[in-house]
Image: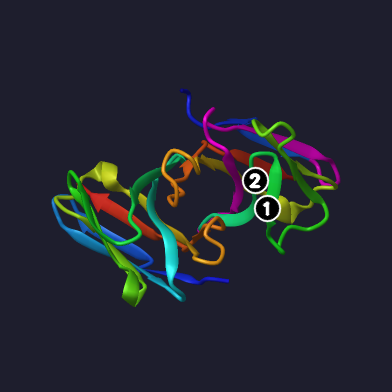
Amino acid sequence: GIQVEQSPPDLILQEGANSTLRCNFSDSVNNLQWFHQNPWGQLINLFYIPSGTKQNGRLSATTVATERYSLLYISSSQTTDSGVYFCAGGTYSSASKIIFGSGTRLSIRP
Amino acid sequence: DTGVSQDPRHKITKRGQNVTFRCDPISEHNRLYWYRQTLGQGPEFLTYFQNEAQLEKSRLLSDRFSAERPKGSFSTLEIQRTEQGDSAMYLCASSSSTSNPGANVLTFGAGSRLTVL
């Protein structure tokens, strides 16, 4: 099955800093999504981004489907951005089987 | 719309007992997923329904695990003869194949945390 690799595994930043999280896929991926898991465990869908670039406030994401990677940018980070960020997707032959990476744990210090 | 609901939120059981979790998806969503998440790991795919049909099931899912979605609405996940290794967060997600064909945007519930003693 598809392999999803996320980097870095951990990131500690001061409030106000910018960050870039990366997700690599072992195969061409469909239904690529980014999620944020808050300290209470709730997973929130941030972006559905099979290709191209999207922005939502301080967050933006870019997927280069031909090179099998996606990036999540967080600008002017706030303590509420802390948590774990996951990317997930499925292959074209099994698009409904959405596989997650192991996540990037982001800690924003005041 | 109240989102995806899961019940119970927490379950503590003794090894060997059976447990059942329930998931109520967003009402207009026809796809339903179950995932398992252990500490420090990403959600691990367990199974997937489209309406009442179970279309995919992970090879990691042992015979002790069974999931149903009898009328294409709510779903149950049962674990028989629980083992300590089953301790995890069990997550349910739903999506719609009709509102945006080709897209499969998952909405997750808050999860059901299982502790097996």
Kind of residue at disc 1: Leu
Give the SS element for disc 1: strand
Quadrant of the drawing holding the N terminus of chain A: bottom right
The count of marks equals: 2
* Residue under the point 45% across and 59% down: A88
In the rendered view, tell whether residue A52 sits above or below residue A69: above
Local crowd size for mark 1, using a 10 Å CA cut-off: few (<14), some (14–19), many (≥20): few
Query: Is residue B22 in view from this perspective?
Result: no
Residue B19 appears at what percent x and percent y?
77, 38
> Horizontal placement of A66 versus A56: left or right?
right
* Residue under the point 30% across and 62% down: A51
Q: Quadrant of residue A93?
A: bottom right
- Whether tag 2 and tag 1 are in contact, CB under 8 A, the answer is yes
Which residue lies under the disc numbered 2? B49
Boundaries of the magenta span: B14-41
Q: B79 or B58, which is in the foreground?
A: B58
Residue B17 appears at what percent x and percent y?
84, 41
Which residue lies under the disc numbered 1? B55
Local crowd size for mark 2, using a 10 Å CA cut-off: few (<14), some (14–19), many (≥20): many
Query: Is residue B29 in view from this perspective?
Result: yes
Q: Chain of mark 1?
A: B
Q: Which mark is residue A104?
A: none
In the rendered view, tell whether residue A45 sits above or below residue A63: above
The verdict on residue A51 being magenta is no
> Horizontal placement of B57 versus A77: left or right?
right
Residue B89 appears at what percent x and percent y?
60, 46
The verdict on residue B24 being magenta is yes
Residue situated furthest top in the rendering? B1
